[in-house]
Image: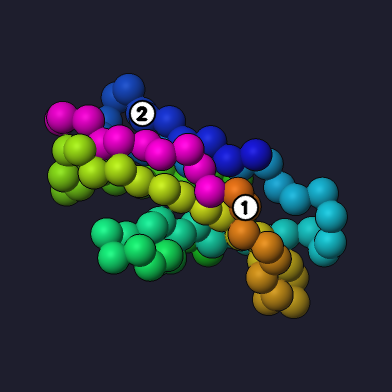
Amino acid sequence: MLGVSSCTTSPQLIVTWTPPVEGSPSVEYIISVLDENGNWVPLEGTFISNRSYRIDMATTSPGKVLLIKVAGIDGLGRQGYWSPISDPYEVKEK
């Protein structure tokens, strides 16, 4: 399960997910965002061990629609399947 919500106290998105129940346990995760050219781009610094991540939206243009996906990485460095793609999130006026 992948969720995207806005933070009420700052211009950030909060991405949360449920770890996979099959395969090797994930020790870290990578998050990718679909860019305007249709390419999935890993977010810098998203090899993280917890199950949530905050995306700074301070420089993102209002009206932009974000799609996000997450994949787990096991202790041997093997990446698992990507999560289903998040629901579209439209960036609001600041």
- Magenta region's main secondary structure? loop
Number of residues whose C-alpha sits closer than 10 Å to that of mark 1, classed few (under 14), some (14–19) or many (20 or more):
some
Location of residue 38 (image quadrant): bottom left
Location of residue 37 (image quadrant): bottom left
Q: Position of residue 17 (x, y in %)?
A: 61, 42
For badge 2, the amino acid type reads: Cys
Q: Is residue 94 above or below residue 21?
A: above
* Quadrant, the C terminus: top left
Which residue is at a point 62% across and 59% down the rendered structure image? Answer: 82
List the residue tagged with mark 2: 7
Q: Residue furthest front?
A: 38
Q: Is residue 64 above or below residue 48?
A: above
Inspect the magenta stretch and tell me whether residue 62 lies in it: no
Which residue is at a point 56% across and 55% down the rendered structure image? Answer: 70
Circle number at residue 29: none
In space, the residues marked 2 and 1 are separated at their CA atoms by 22 Å
List the residue tagged with mark 1: 83
* Quadrant, the N terminus: top right
State the residue in front, 54 or 31: 31
For badge 1, the amino acid type reads: Ser
Which residue is at a point 47% across and 38% down the rendered structure image? Answer: 87
Inspect the magenta stretch and tell me whether residue 93 lies in it: yes
Residue 45 can be seen in this image: no
Number of residues whose C-alpha sits closer than 10 Å to that of mark 2, classed few (under 14), some (14–19) or many (20 or more):
few
Residues rendered magenta in the picture: 85-94
